Image (spheres, rainbow, N blue to C red):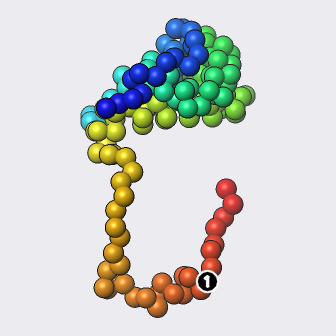
Amino acid sequence: MNTWSSLPEVVDVPGDCRAWLCAVADHLIPASVTMPAAGAAGVGAGQLDVVLHSRPDLVRELLRAWSSTTELGPAEAVDQLRQLDEPAYRAVLLIVAGGYYTNPEVRDLLGYTGQQPRTVQIAEDIDEDLLMRVVERGPRYRQA
């Protein structure tokens, strides 16, 4: 059962903002042969509420992005946000991606069933000496 469909609307996002987000979302994630566009997946509608329920801190940036680019087309709006308002740009990207990939239909089309516990067995053909060199070397990472 999808509990997201019963979530109350977090904030009253104006209908014009939702329509703008749908157009921007379709620009960012267009339809393919097998996958729906972000707007068709509800990114400007119910999926927006799902995202904002989890991340209400994104509302301010979303409304700022909308109000500053409402007269522009989707591609121009994204470019302007990228150049002039990085926090709003990142918020829009997060909202679109989060709304898209939390959509049950999209997850089903991708074959994603969520995190599942599973047992991992080490294959007999793995060279343990090779693994020990990695363990002895210690962690290596690059700060992002």
Circle 1: element type: helix
Q: Residue at x 54, y 87 (%)?
A: 133
Residue in the foreground of this view, choosing between 20 and 62: 62
Q: Specify whether 114 is left or right of 68.
A: left
Q: Residue furthest bottom?
A: 129
Crowding near pointer 1: few (<14 within 10 Å), some, many (20+)? few
Residue with the mark numbered 1: 137
Quarter of the image where the C terminus is located: bottom right
Residue 33 position (above or below residue 142) = above
Q: Is residue 48 above or below residue 16?
A: below
Residue at 31% from the left image edge and 32% from the top image edge: 1
To which quarter of the image does residue 55 belong? Answer: top right
Residue 32 visible in the current orientation: no
Q: Can residue 71 be seen by looking at this rendering? A: yes
Residue at the (42%, 27%) spot, across then down: 4
Q: Nearer the viewer, residue 120 or 21?
A: 120
> Dividing the picture into quarters, in which one does residue 53 lie?
top right
From the viewer's perspective, is 35 left or right of 24?
left
Q: Quadrant of residue 135?
A: bottom right
Count of numbered marks = 1
Depth check, front residue: 119 or 109: 119
Q: Residue 67 location in percent, x, y?
A: 66, 13
Name of the residue lying farthest toward the right: 84
Circle 1: residue type:
Arg
Which residue lies most toward the top here? 15
Q: Is residue 97 above or below residue 45?
A: below
Q: Tell me residue 86's x, y (percent).
A: 70, 33
The residue positioned 63% from the left and 72% from the top of the image is: 140
